[in-house]
Image (spheres, rainbow, N blue to C red):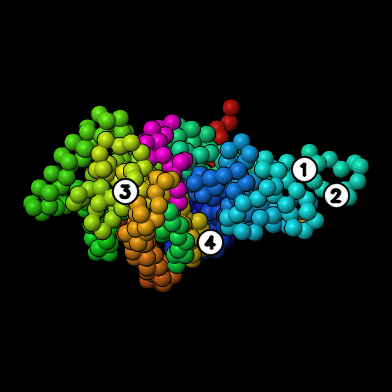
């Protein structure tokens, strides 16, 4: 697709409506998304407990970028392009592993865990190993949540987000937790449909019987004028519960109040700690903690659910007993990888402190349901009858913010405002 066509579509986006079909179906716009969004912004890729020990390494492909993330000898976490500087062989092939050094299978060029080339035979006297280290990729750990950025100059406002979010996430000790389970799901839809679906709970009542056990229906924004009298009363009581809970948690030193910068920052995000329904401890089918060991020294088992959303590709839920992280990695215009990880206290033992099935069942079911719904929209976007439809101003305003952010970032890249002559 010519860039003029993309500019026309971006300029013509109707606010408050879903995107034009090519944004979901066109391979050319998919390539543009990878260039302007996934190669320019901070992308959530995993957690520090994925690679707890020096030499632990994991790999991930984002479009045409092969990435490796390794724990170095000093305990730091680093990211590199997963490609040998000799003749370009892929360096690490496993999704996860443990190495002493990073050794290329082809001609055994060997890199240390800091990415320096430390061994390359038969390269002659003039060869400078110092010029052939692995290419680094920007990496930041936000209390154990690993973000990478493929841009030369990453968006600087990550620091602002990290400063605000750090105190919210820190009490859950993610850096020091263990990954109890990791699950990859390939959703049959464009990555933006996966993200849009995540940004609303309009569909929850009709589609998520498991998730609606611990979540309050009112937690994700219904406006009073939209409700009947009984619902209005429930929403009012829920509002009081949120205010009281925020007061209790904040007095105990647990940041909980809403912060929202979904479309007014380059590194857009949102957070809020919300009380849970029932006994209110966790995202489980009985709303009780799934793990006997809390993630940190919390004042109570009823720590609600802290959600943390980032543009363009992640959402997370932190409870008193466990956390769940979700990363979306686009595969092509029709398919997106959703990688979900469940984290518990590092000393928790499966079968003793937690039952794995109980820990994962709500989100395993919810992910499968969301995947099907995303597929419905992808199918619809391919048909002649599709036209952008209106978002609910009461329940889908955060979907609108996702689209605003996306269109804004695409325009900043492909259609920047002309610089006024001096
Ligand atoms: O996971 C989330 O944060 C959102 C909100 C509730 C529904 N949805 C899956
Ligand atoms: Fe890696 Fe030759 S391509 S050592
Ligand atoms: Fe859902």
Q: Residue at x 84, y 40 (%)?
A: 128
Q: Please indicate, yes or no, whether residue 217 appears anywhere in the rendered image.
A: yes
Q: Nearer the viewer, mark 2 or mark 4?
A: 2
In terms of sequence position, does the residue under pointer 2 or pointer 4 come before the other? 2
Tell me the quadrant of the picture where the N terminus can be found. Answer: bottom right
What is the spatial separation of the Cα atoms under label 2 and label 3, in whole angstroms? 53 Å
Q: To which residue does mark 4 refer?
A: 331
Q: Which residue is mark 1?
A: 118
* 45 or 333, nearer to the observer: 45
Q: Secondary structure at mark 3?
A: loop
**Residue placed most toward the observer, 308 or 352:** 352
| Of the image marks 1 and 4, the number of the one nearer the N terminus | 1
Residue 99 placement, left or right of 200: right
Proximity of marks 2 and 1: CB atoms separated by less than 8 Å: no
Mark nearest the camera among 3 and 1 is 3
Nearer the observer: mark 1 or 4; the answer is 1
Asked whether disc 3 touches disc 1, contact meaning CB atoms under 8 Å apart, the reply is no
Say which element carries label 1: strand
Distance between the alpha carbons at the discs numbered 2 and 4: 37 Å
Question: Label 2, on which residue?
Answer: 121
| Left or right of 305 in this view: 160 | right
Answer yes or no: do the residues labelled 1 and 4 have beta carbons within 8 Å?
no
The region drawn magenta spans 163-179
Tell me which numbered mark, 3 or 1, is placed earlier along the sequence: 1
In the figure, 356 relative to 74: above or below?
Answer: below
Question: Is 188 drawn above or below residue 413 in the view shown?
Answer: below
The x and y percentages for residue 370 are: 36, 62
Disc 3 from disc 1: Cα separation: 46 Å
């Amino acid at each position: 697709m010519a860039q003029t066509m993309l500019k026309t579509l971006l300029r013509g986006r109707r606010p408050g409506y879903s995107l034009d079909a090519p944004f979901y179906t066109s391979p050319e716009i998919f390539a543009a998304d990878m260039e302007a969004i996934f190669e320019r912004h901070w992308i959530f890729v995993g957690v520090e407990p994925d690679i707890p020990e020096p030499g632990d390494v994991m790999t991930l492909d984002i479009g045409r970028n092969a990435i490796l993330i390794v724990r170095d000898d000093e305990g730091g976490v680093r990211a590199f392009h997963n490609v040998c500087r000799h003749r370009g062989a892929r360096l690490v092939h496993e999704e996860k592993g443990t190495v002493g050094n990073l050794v290329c299978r082809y001609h055994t060029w060997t890199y240390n865990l800091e990415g320096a080339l430390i061994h390359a035979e038969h390269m002659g006297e003039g060869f400078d190993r110092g010029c052939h280290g692995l290419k680094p990729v920007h990496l930041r750990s936000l209390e154990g949540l690993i973000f990478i950025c493929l841009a030369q100059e990453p968006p600087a406002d990550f620091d602002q987000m990290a400063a605000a979010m750090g105190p919210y996430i820190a009490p859950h000790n993610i850096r020091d937790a263990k990954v109890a389970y990791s699950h990859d799901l390939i959703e049959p839809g464009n990555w933006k449909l996966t993200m849009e679906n995540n940004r609303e709970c309009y569909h929850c009542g009709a589609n998520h019987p498991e998730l609606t056990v611990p979540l309050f229906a009112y937690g994700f924004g219904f406006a009073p004028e939209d409700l009947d009298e009984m619902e209005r009363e429930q929403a009012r009581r829920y509002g009081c519960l949120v205010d009281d809970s925020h007061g209790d948690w904040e007095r105990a030193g647990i940041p909980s109040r809403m912060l929202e910068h979904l479309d007014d920052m380059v590194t857009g995000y949102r957070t809020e700690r919300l009380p849970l329904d029932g006994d209110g401890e966790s995202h489980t089918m009985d709303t009780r903690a799934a793990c006997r060991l809390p993630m940190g020294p919390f004042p109570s088992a009823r720590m609600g659910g802290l959600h943390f959303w980032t543009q363009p590709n992640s959402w997370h839920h932190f409870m008193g007993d466990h956390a769940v992280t979700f990363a979306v990695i686009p595969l092509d215009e029709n398919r997106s990888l959703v990688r979900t990880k469940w984290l518990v206290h590092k000393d928790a033992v499966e079968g003793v402190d937690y039952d794995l099935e109980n820990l994962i069942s709500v989100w395993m079911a919810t992910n499968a349901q969301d995947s099907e719904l995303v597929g419905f929209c992808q199918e619809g976007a391919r048909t002649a009858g599709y036209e952008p439809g209106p978002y609910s101003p009461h329940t889908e305003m955060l979907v609108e913010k996702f689209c605003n952010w996306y269109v804004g970032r695409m325009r900043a890249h492909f259609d920047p405002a002309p610089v006024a002559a001096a």
